Amino acid sequence: MDAETILNPAEHLRLAATGDLPAQRAFVQLALEMIRGGADPIWGYNGALIWARIAAAHGYPEDRQVLAGCLCGLAKTLSDNGSEDAAADVMIEAVAITDELADEGCEAAAGLLNQLVEILPPRVAGQAKAFRESRPRVRDERNEEGK
C-alpha cells in the first residue's frame, strides 16, 4: 500500500473491501489503536472484529490469532462492565479459534488455551468444541498458492 492510499481513506476502504489483506489488517490495527487511545472499547472491538473476521477468513494463523485476541479483549470489556454471560458467549468463539490454532501446532495458542480452560466457566469449553465442529475449516491461502 503506498502513501497516497494511506492518506485517502476511501481508497483504503475500497482496497480492504475488495480483499486486500494488508488494508484489512490496517483497519484492525487502527481500531485497536483507537481503543488504546481512549475510544469506547465496546465500539472499538466491534469495529476491529469486522475487519479481523474478514482478514482471518484468508486463513493465515496470525490473522486468526488477532481475531481471537480481539474477541478476548471484547470479552474482558464486557466482563468488566458486569456482562458475565455475554463475555462467556464471546469467549466461546475465542476458545474455539485458540483450540484450532493449538491443534495446528501453535505453541503460544496451546499455552493460552490451558490458561483459559482454568479460568473460564466450564460451559465455555464444551460450547467452544461444538462451535468449532459446526463451522467450516478455515483455508490457509499459503497452502493454496501454487495449486
Image (cartoon, rainbow, N blue to C red):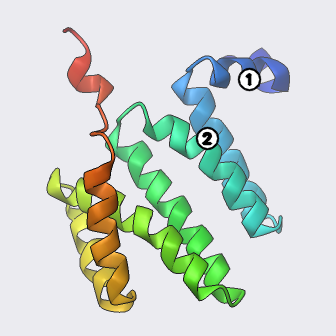
Q: Residue at x 82, y 68 (%)?
A: 40
The disc labelled 1 sits on which kind of residue? His
Residue 41 % position (x, y): 74, 68
Residue 79 position by quadrant: bottom right
Does the CB distance between marks 1 and 2 fall below 8 Å?
no
Residue 12 got which mark?
A: 1
Residue 29 shows in the view: yes
Q: Residue at x 27, y 24 (%)?
A: 142
Q: Residue at x 74, y 23 (%)?
A: 12
Would you say 129 lies left or right of 70 here? Answer: left
Q: Residues within 10 Å of mark 1 (few under 14, many from 20)?
A: many
Residue 122 % position (x, y): 32, 88
Q: Residues within 10 Å of mark 2 (few under 14, many from 20)?
A: many
Residue 125 position by quadrant: bottom left
Q: Is residue 101 above or below residue 91?
A: above
Residue position for label 2: 51
Residue 2 % position (x, y): 68, 16
The disc labelled 2 sits on which kind of residue? Trp
Q: Is residue 137 above or below residue 49?
A: above
Q: Quadrant for the N terminus, please.
A: top right
Residue 98 shows in the view: no
Q: Quadrant for the C terminus, please.
A: top left
Q: Earlier in the sequence, mark 1 or mark 2?
A: 1
Given residues 85 and 94, the one toward you in this image is 85
Would you say 137 lies left or right of 37 here? Answer: left
